[in-house]
Amino acid sequence: MRTMIMAAVAAGTMALTGCQSVDRNVAIPAGIGALGGAAIGAGISGNARGALIGAAVGGAGGALLGAATNRPGQCVYRDGRGQRYTAECPAGY
């Protein structure tokens, strides 16, 4: 039963990831995170609810990680008011 749940979640995640028209640097880490989260959630809880929660958390984390690494040559800074902005990295960085 647990294997069937993980296979269904994996197939659904891959189908949704393939249909999106977002950048591959975001979609692929999100899909991998969702698959890993589903496997961990199913392993810990032993039911479909845990697999779905794990897939959601893993997918969101993977998407954030993929988006953060999507800007080669760009660094994230904070100004005096604490707001974040992106600009070119210093020379040699």
Image: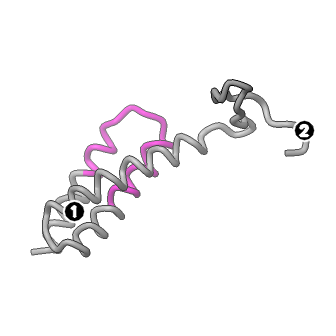
Q: Amino acid at mark 1?
A: Ala
The part of the image, by quadrant, that contains residue 87 is top right
The residue furthest left is 1
Binning the other alpha carbons within 10 Å of mark 1 as few (below 14), some (14 to 19) or many (20 upward) gives many
Q: Are marks 1 and 2 in contact (CB under 8 Å)?
A: no
- Magenta stretch mostly in which secondary structure? helix
Residue name at image x 68 percent, y 29 percent: 86
Rendered-image quadrant of the C terminus = top right
Residue 5 is situated, as x and y percent measured from the top left of the image, at 15, 66
Magenta-drawn segment: 13-35
Residue 57 location in percent, x, y?
33, 53
Which circle's residue, 1 or 2, is located before the other in the chain? 1
Tell me where residue 77 appears, x and y as whole percent.
72, 34
- What residue sits 27% from the left and 43% below the top? 16
Element at label 2 = loop
Residue carrying label 2: 91
Front residue of 56/15: it is 56
Viewer-proximal residue, 64 or 72?
A: 64
Label of residue 74 in the image: none
The span from disc 1 to disc 2 (Cα, nearest Å) is 45 Å
Tell me which residue sits at (26%, 66%) in the image.
Answer: 41
Residue 5 lies in the magenta-colored region: no
**Residue type marked 2:** Ala
Q: Secondary structure at mark 1?
A: helix
Q: Position of residue 33 (x, y in %)?
A: 40, 57
Q: Which residue is mark 1?
A: 51
Answer left or right for 24 relative to 41: right
